[in-house]
């Protein structure tokens, strides 16, 4: 009876730990993808904005739409990381 309780507690603790680690890994991967995408959009926008051709100005407008949500995501990531450090 005691062995069964210890085994169930150990399995529950292990599953919870593995789930937490997996969730943190997924969060880190999504955060990194968002940051890399933001950097790519900003670089591409600056390069396209240097030209005055009409097609490249359309690219600048297109990229401007995607940059704002990514900046918001970046700000949230920064706030969460600062909160983790201070807590």
Image (cartoon, rainbow, N blue to C red):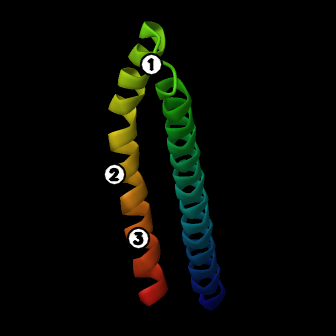
Q: Nearer the viewer, residue 71 or 45?
A: 45
User: Considering only order in the chain, which callout, 1 or 2, is on the residue closer to the N terminus?
Assistant: 1
- Looking at this view, name the residue that lies furthest to the top: 54
Q: Residue 32 at what x, y percent from top left?
A: 58, 52
- Residue at mark 3 to residue at mark 2: CA–CA distance: 12 Å
- Residue at mark 1 to residue at mark 3: CA–CA distance: 32 Å
Residue 39 found in image quarter = top right
> Quick one: label 1, few (<14), some, or many (20+) residues within 10 Å?
some
**Residues under numbered marks 1 and 3 in contact, where contact means CB atoms less than 8 Å apart:** no
Name the disc covering residue 33, or none: none
> Quick one: label 2, few (<14), some, or many (20+) residues within 10 Å?
few
- Which residue has dot 2 on it? 72
- Which residue has dot 3 on it? 80
- Give the SS element for disc 3: helix
Against 10, is 54 above or below?
A: above
Residue at horizontal 42 percent and vertical 8 percent from the top: 54
Q: Residue 38 at what x, y percent from top left?
A: 50, 43
User: Considering only order in the chain, which callout, 2 or 3, is on the residue closer to the N terminus?
Assistant: 2
User: Considering only order in the chain, which callout, 3 or 1, is on the residue closer to the N terminus?
Assistant: 1
- Which residue has dot 1 on it? 59
């Amino acid at each position: 009876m005691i062995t069964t309780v210890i085994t169930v507690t150990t399995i529950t603790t292990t599953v919870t730990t593995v789930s937490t680690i997996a969730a943190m890994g997924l969060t880190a991967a999504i955060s990194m993808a968002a940051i890399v995408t933001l950097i790519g959009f900003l670089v591409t926008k600056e390069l396209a904005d240097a030209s005055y051709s009409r097609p490249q100005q359309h690219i600048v407008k297109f990229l401007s739409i995607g940059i704002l949500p990514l900046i918001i995501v970046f700000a949230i990531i920064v706030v969460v990381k600062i909160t983790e450090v201070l807590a």
